[in-house]
Image (spheres, rainbow, N blue to C red):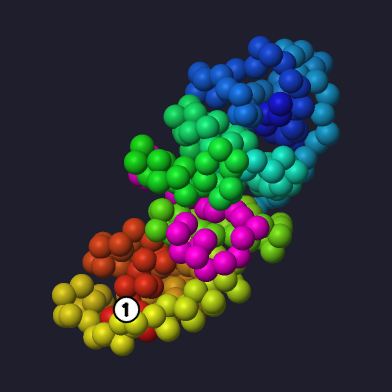
């Protein structure tokens, strides 16, 4: 069992590898079978008391340039729940997330069943989940999450790079789809993008999705004058760039506006088109011949 140890006095954080059976999970809950809790506790005092064993230090990525208006500040990091039945991949991803002070890994789970328990036991902002969980699927877990925690976001991490898998993930409520072995060292950035109202999709997959949607029957239909006409010119511009795979930060740089303003436009697009994700907004626009 592993849990995150963060200094409250400015010392370097470290990862504690203790497997103490007396360990208590955050928020007053205990991790069940298949769950690993990541606990914040103080390094104050001398020695390694309190059941904490010696462990290697993980240097945090210092991001002094991270805009203060964005979600993911050191004093209030984005909380992440990681669910993957691949132990090695969980280790790789967890180490990357733990090394970023803008994020807090609150728990891990290695199956659908333990993932469902973790959804109930922990407060989190973003769920990172694999598709194949052995006793269930990530799609089911995302759908369940959206029912009980509709404000939380979901990012799929999978070895499957097919359009069908991605489309099903978005239909389930995901706002990100990352092909595992093409995203090393960027998982933290993907989480932060999603937490700040954006989306994260492996670029090659995003391009294939657009090509597929363009070839679907009905894409040449014209807007019916109801929802699409409600979009402002700026919102249409943002929507076209979303379809091109641009992140909120990249859109802001292109349009000379802040990423926060971009996310306001994105939320307005969702509201006017009555959709929940970027993929749904793009699909809607394509179906009415806007893109």
Q: Residue at x 68, y 29 (%)?
A: 3
Query: Which percent across, then down, holds residue 62?
Result: 69, 50
Q: Which residues are magenta?
A: 149-169
Task: Residue 168: say if magenta.
Answer: yes
Whether residue 234 can be seen here: no
Q: Eyeballing the image, is 74 above or below 244?
A: above
Location of residue 218 by image quarter: bottom left
For disc 1, the marked residue is 287
Location of residue 178 by image quarter: bottom right
Query: Which percent across, then down, holds residue 134?
Result: 60, 41
- Relative to 290, 110 lies left or right: right
Q: Eyeballing the image, is 177 above or below 253?
A: above
Whether residue 190 can be seen here: yes
Location of residue 16 by image quarter: top right
Q: Residue at x 74, y 32 (%)?
A: 15
Which part of the image, by quadrant, shows the N terminus? top right
- Relative to 73, 151 lies left or right: left
- Residue at disc 1, secondary structure: helix
Q: Eyeballing the image, is 81 above or below 236?
A: above
Q: Residue at x 67, y 61 (%)?
A: 183
């Amino acid at each position: 069992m592993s849990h995150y140890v963060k200094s409250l006095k400015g010392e370097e954080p470290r990862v504690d590898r203790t497997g103490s059976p007396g360990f208590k999970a955050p928020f007053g809950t205990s991790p069940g079978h298949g769950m690993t809790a990541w606990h914040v506790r103080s390094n104050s005092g001398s020695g390694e008391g309190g059941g904490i064993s010696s462990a290697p230090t993980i240097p945090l990525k210092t991001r002094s340039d991270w805009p203060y208006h964005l979600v993911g500040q050191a004093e209030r990091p984005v909380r992440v729940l990681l669910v993957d039945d691949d132990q090695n991949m969980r280790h790789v991803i967890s180490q990357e997330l733990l090394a970023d002070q803008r994020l807090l890994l609150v728990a891990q789970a290695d199956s659908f069943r333990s993932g469902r328990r973790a959804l109930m036991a922990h407060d989190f902002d973003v769920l990172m989940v694999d598709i194949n969980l052995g006793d269930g699927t990530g799609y089911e877990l995302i759908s369940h999450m959206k029912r009980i925690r509709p404000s939380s976001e979901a990012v799929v991490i999978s070895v499957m790079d097919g359009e069908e898998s991605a489309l099903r993930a978005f239909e389930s409520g995901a706002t990100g789809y990352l092909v595992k072995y093409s995203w090393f060292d960027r998982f933290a950035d993907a989480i932060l993008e999603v937490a700040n109202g954006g989306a994260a999709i492996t670029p090659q997959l995003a391009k294939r999705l657009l090509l597929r949607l363009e070839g679907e029957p009905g894409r040449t239909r014209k807007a019916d004058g109801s929802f699409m006409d409600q979009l402002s010119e700026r919102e249409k511009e943002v929507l076209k760039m979303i379809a091109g795979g641009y992140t909120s930060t990249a859109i802001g740089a292109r349009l000379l506006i802040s990423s926060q303003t971009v996310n306001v436009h994105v939320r307005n697009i969702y509201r006017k088109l009555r959709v929940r994700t970027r993929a749904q907004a793009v699909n809607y626009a394509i179906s009415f011949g806007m893109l």
